Amino acid sequence: MIHASTQMLAEIREAPAVVARQLAHAEIYREEGERLRREAPRFVATCARGSSDQAVTFFKYIAEQRLGLPIASVGPSIASVYGAELKFEGGILLTVSQSGGSPDLVSLQERAAKGGARTLALLNVTDSAVGNAAGSVLPMMAGQEKAVAATKSFVASLVALATVVAHWKRRQDPSRRAVSAAGKSGSRRWNAIGRRAHCQWRRPIPCSRSGAGRGLGWQAKLP
């Protein structure tokens, strides 16, 4: 029987509590979704790296499917290395980052704002360089993450972005019960996942795996 534990595993086990915290304070995401509905941006561009970039690709699929709004990724080096002038009138720049400490993300935010964008950041560390430079900030509420691999903050990113889109869409979709039902269902699922995360698995975990998928499932699976 396997009893070994790591910092990464400990943080994985915190994910259900993180999701519960987000659902308890979901008005933060609701307010942003309603603001986006009022503003009706022409497009959203995203700025992220690594697992955060996977999270915004998840956002891209769900927003394009539910809202019919084009979402595109902009590489941070466009601003920090190449110094390009960006035309962002009528658009939103969404930055997603766990630490919020990357200067190149800040550079892109500044260029986008100069080009006419409203800058929105989803961060785990809100009091950071990216957070202080953003026009609006949403917290992941994942707590401190010490492991190199993002785990609970990645899950928190998906929950936050999906909740924002749900409230952004809500007036177009008259079913006002959809968001609260999803929250209750999500709580039950995460409680079950939390119990499984504390199991002692008898079989060794394989060193490598392969999988198949597309759309939302593919992006959520990759990290």
Image (tube, rainbow, N blue to C red):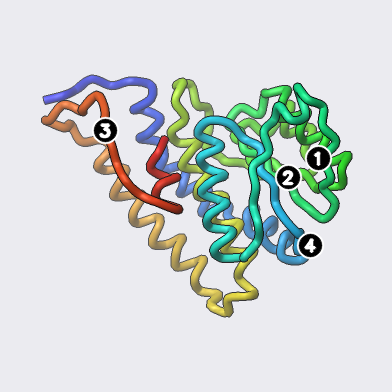
Q: CA distance from mark 2 to mark 1?
A: 7 Å
Disc 4 or disc 2, which is closer to the eye?
2
What residue lies at 56% left-to-right and 51% top-to-bottom?
59
Q: CA distance from mark 2 to mark 3?
A: 34 Å
Q: CA distance from mark 4 to mark 2?
A: 14 Å
Q: CA distance from mark 4 to mark 3?
A: 43 Å
| Secondary structure beneath label 4 | helix
What residue lies at 68% left-to-right and 38% top-to-bottom?
74
Identify the residue position indicated by label 1 in the image.
Answer: 112
Identify the residue position indicated by label 3 in the image.
Answer: 209
Q: Amino acid at mark 4?
A: Glu
Identify the residue position indicated by label 2 in the image.
Answer: 93
Q: Earlier in the sequence, mark 1 or mark 4?
A: 4
The N terminus appears in which quarter of the rendering?
A: top left
Up/down of 90 relative to 147, above or below: below
Identify the residue position indicated by label 4 in the image.
Answer: 39
Q: Are marks 2 and 1 in contact (CB under 8 Å)?
A: yes
